[in-house]
Image (cartoon, helix red, strand yellow):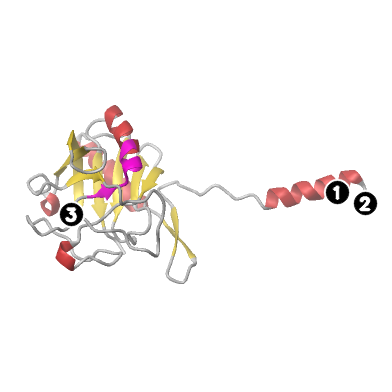
Amino acid sequence: MNSKILFLLLSILSFSCQKTKPNTLFGEYVIKDKINTKVAKTYTVEIEHIQQFSKQKGYNQDIAFMIDYSLHSGYQRFFVIDLKKGEILKKGLVCHGGAKGKNNSGIPTAFGNVNESHCTSLGMAVIGKRAYSSWGKHYKYWLDGLEKSNSNMRKRVVVLHAWDGVDDKDIYPNVLAVSWGCPTVSVQFLDELDVLLKEHEKVLLYSFSNP
């Protein structure tokens, strides 16, 4: 076989085997369902909601955080969003509230805003001040709920913090441990968020569950 033809065939084969970069426009996120087939979730509606809310209310319009609690806790469901481009910049695992035994499976079904309920609160919140924490690397961020569904976050001491028991990659189909309502992430992931929060103020955190 002519060497030039052989080189051309090998080049075509090599190109065809390359993995394409995932499309992150408007938060496309590929996961696997219960029968191990790939399923793409897009977050166009959620990201546009954050964009509009931040613009109307005067919050940070560069980045935001969002958590999709309709995803299994074994998936990285905490997202850092580039609001200008509508893209996912980072993602990580996050615990949901155990709701006193009601949410011990991978996907929470009980949410709330009541003190001592140990429930995750849904809705829009803003990241508050950095403070001391007994968990992880001993720092946390206060959260202030901006809607009726999460107005008691600060009173309930529902904060963004880290825990050594949270992994840095998907653990599905295994279930992540539950919290008392706090969005709890890995130590490494909180350190990455910490870098962003030192550069940006009034960053929104949008928590939702849309199966």
What's under tag 3, amino acid-wise? Answer: Gly
Residue holding disc 1: 6
State the extent of the magenta-drawn residues as a range.
183-191
Residue holding disc 3: 181
Residue 142 magenta-highlighted:
no
Q: Nearer the viewer, residue 58 or 189?
A: 189
Residue holding disc 2: 1
The quadrant holding residue 161 is top left
Q: Nearer the viewer, residue 41 or 11?
A: 11
Q: Nearer the viewer, residue 101 or 79?
A: 101
Q: Mark 2 vs mark 1: which is more N-terminal?
A: 2
Indicate left or right for 114 with 143 as reference. left
Q: Residue at x 35, y 39 (%)?
A: 83
**Mark whose residue sits in front, 3 or 2:** 3
What's under tag 2, amino acid-wise? Answer: Met
The quadrant holding residue 60 is top left
Report crowding for label 1: few under 14, some 14 to 19, many 20 or more residues within 10 A (C-alpha).
few
CA distance separating discs 3 and 2:
67 Å
